[in-house]
Image (cartoon, grey):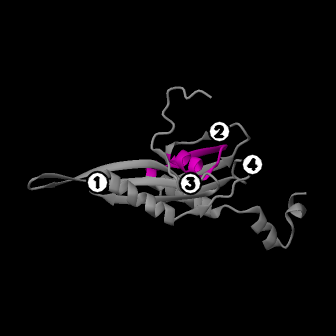
Amino acid sequence: MENRGRDRDRGDRDRNDGFVEKLVKLNRTAKVVKGGRRFSFSALTVVGDRAGNVGYGFGKAKDVSEAIRKSIDKAKRAMVRLPIKNGTLPHDLVGEYKASKVIMKPACPGSGIIAGGAVRAVMEAGGVTDVLAKSVGARTANNVVRAVFAGIEEMMDAKVVAKNRGKTIKDMWG
């Protein structure tokens, strides 16, 4: 498929340890002091193995590369399991964090990732290939990513549900 002039892999780095690192947001703040301005940077990154493990991290430093490194380290420490069924999510889910709300729905094969920037980064790093997502409310990148992870935490795995009900997966879905 043609890229159509869009830079889809911006902020995407594939390391030799098998993790994909995506820079979601880089912010520069300035503190005015007697001698001028002092700049500080904050970075929000998403790290995943494209096989169902994904995490996010937020780092601050006086240097861009140091802020990105800190956020990647935090993301690797905060990895969660994302259950994927045939390249998509197993069921509809809604994630909420403060004023941000993200609605995510499974999509049929070939649909692709139909989502905004922050949600797209999480899904690509996690290995989801087909999903429909809509961000409602506040669109701050940090809060949207946290809302996606709040939704992932609520996601149910078929094996766990069947075990809790005392049935097999075949009994539940035929």
Specify the amino acid type for callout 4: Asn
State which region is magenta.
118-141
> Badge 1: few (under 14), some or many (20 or more) residues near its Cα, within 10 Å?
few
Disc 3 or disc 1, which is closer to the eye? 3
Specify the amino acid type for callout 1: Asp
> Badge 2: few (under 14), some or many (20 or more) residues near its Cα, within 10 Å?
some
**Circle 1 residue:** 63
In the rendering, which numbered label is found on residue 112? 2
Under tag 3, what secondary structure?
loop
Q: CA distance from mark 3 to mark 1?
A: 26 Å
Q: Residue at x 64, y 58 (%)?
A: 82
Whichever of callouts 2 and 1 sits on the residue coming sooner in the sequence is 1
In the picture, measured across the screen, residue 31 lies left or right of residue 23, that is left
In the picture, measured across the screen, residue 137 lies left or right of residue 163, that is left
Q: Position of residue 27 (x, y in %)?
A: 34, 49
Whichever of callouts 3 and 2 sits on the residue coming sooner in the sequence is 3
Q: Specify the quadrant of the image occupied by residue 170.
A: bottom right
**Circle 4 residue:** 86
Q: CA distance from mark 4 to mark 3?
A: 21 Å
> Badge 4: few (under 14), some or many (20 or more) residues near its Cα, within 10 Å?
few
Q: CA distance from mark 4 to mark 2?
A: 12 Å
Q: Position of residue 74 (x, y in %)?
A: 45, 63
In the rendering, which numbered label is found on residue 7? none
